[in-house]
Amino acid sequence: MTMTNLLGLLVLLLGGLALVAADQGYEGYRIYEVTPQNAVQGKLLHQLSLEGFDFLSESRLPGRPSRVIVSPAQLETFETVLRGQKLAHTLVNDNLGASIAKEFALRQLQRRLSPITGKGRLSTERYYTHEEIINYIDDLADRFPRRVFVKTVGWSFERRVLKTITITNGDGRSGKKVIFMDGGFHAREWISPAAVLYVIDQLVEQFEQNADLLEDYDWVILPLVNADGYEHSQSSTLSRMWRKTRQPYTYAGQTCYGADPNRNFGFHWNEEGASSNPCADTYAGPTPFSEPETIVVRDLMHSLADRGVMYLTIHSYGNYILYPWGWTSDLPDTWEDLDAVARTGAEAIKAVTGTVYTYGSSTNVLYIAAGASDDYGFYAGFNISITMELTGAGSIGFNPPVTRIDEFVTETWIGIRAMAEKLIEIY
């Protein structure tokens, strides 16, 4: 069977994965690791992602594995694709639903054993709620009033407050350069806000060790962009793999929720790599900036652009440090500076932990994905714009087991600190 025939079969047989999961949970869903051996196979995997398969991580590079969720209804067709294209693959989870149920049971136990008051330092022993994150940064502003400033910058669709924390060295100098950082674009990527919280801890609680990063730069951090989706993903086992925002849209007589906030930015919006189907995980939204959450990020970028030097957004997963462009395989004129910063982060992580991060432009390393925040940040005036896709682990992938959160966030900090040092050297 040719690849064209296989893809035609997929279109006929596949239902929308997100819809099935939302209605029936994930019992019997599987996770496969699939490794393309050539460009044709890499293109096929990307096409599968556009036809309804939910990829946890995706690579177009030969020899680099991708991970994909397969529902019971999709299984026969998927195995036909594997056989027909002789795709190297491994079954890494034979029942996603059971893994999610176990994760939730452990999480509920941890929350009972270690309730959070919102005062003092957060540990790296569990994942926190939106409310706990907000309480934490508010408390930091109370405890470090000369160095930390918290500001309400907007509201989510479901009226959850969105706040930034600005971290300075307290010397009172105005007009410093800015590093703008955010996390939690995609709801299910819980390790992203966890890593951002660790960066905040290092810059505030461990100030003496990191004062050099704040001498000429202020850090403005939005810890959790997609607050509604994040809370939804924590609400039950049925919604654990939720990715998008939560604004409802009507499509073909049914209600589908949310847009992909990382396809909703108004720079090459809704081009290749984004979907016009409101039920798809990569739905670009009905218009650019249709989501209040992406409006907040956009407005922050423009308000900071005259001082902003670096925009850094944290995602999961796949061991990548990516820079523009994501809408085309062409490189920006200043790609060498972008590459130098990304390379420095990757080399620092490898030197300390041995973990290998692939770095390069988003399209050339992964795939075209238009309308993303890193492209918009670069377009808005930030000299350096980076997406960091963290290491995955565990039976689900997006979140390391809680016993390994500390390992992963400290590794992430190694790369971020090195990139910041390189930024200071260049600019």
Image (cartoon, rainbow, N blue to C red):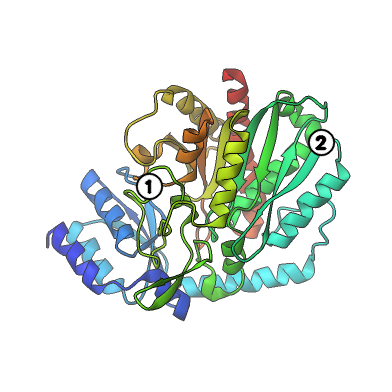
Q: Are marks 2 and 1 in contact (CB under 8 Å)?
A: no
User: Quick one: 256 or 167, which is closer to the camera?
Assistant: 256
Q: Position of residue 277 (x, y in %)?
A: 35, 64
Tally the numbered discs.
2
Residue underneath mark 2: 147
Residue 366 in the figure: left or right of residue 100: left
User: Quick one: 263 or 169, which is closer to the camera?
Assistant: 263
Amino acid under label 2? Answer: Arg
Marking on residue 209: none
In the rendered image, the residue lying farthest to the left is 1
Marking on residue 369: 1
SS under mark 2: loop
Q: Which residue is drawn at 42% across and 47% down?
A: 371
Q: Position of residue 284 (x, y in %)?
A: 41, 56
User: Quick one: 206 or 292, which is closer to the camera?
Assistant: 292
Above or below 392: residue 379: above
Above or below 131: residue 331: above
Where the C terminus falls, by quadrant?
A: top right
Q: Residues within 10 Å of mark 2 (few under 14, many from 20)?
A: some
Q: Residue at x 50, y 63 (%)?
A: 395
The earlier-in-sequence mark between 2 and 1 is 2
Quarter occupied by residue 267: top left
Q: Position of residue 198 (x, y in %)?
A: 69, 45
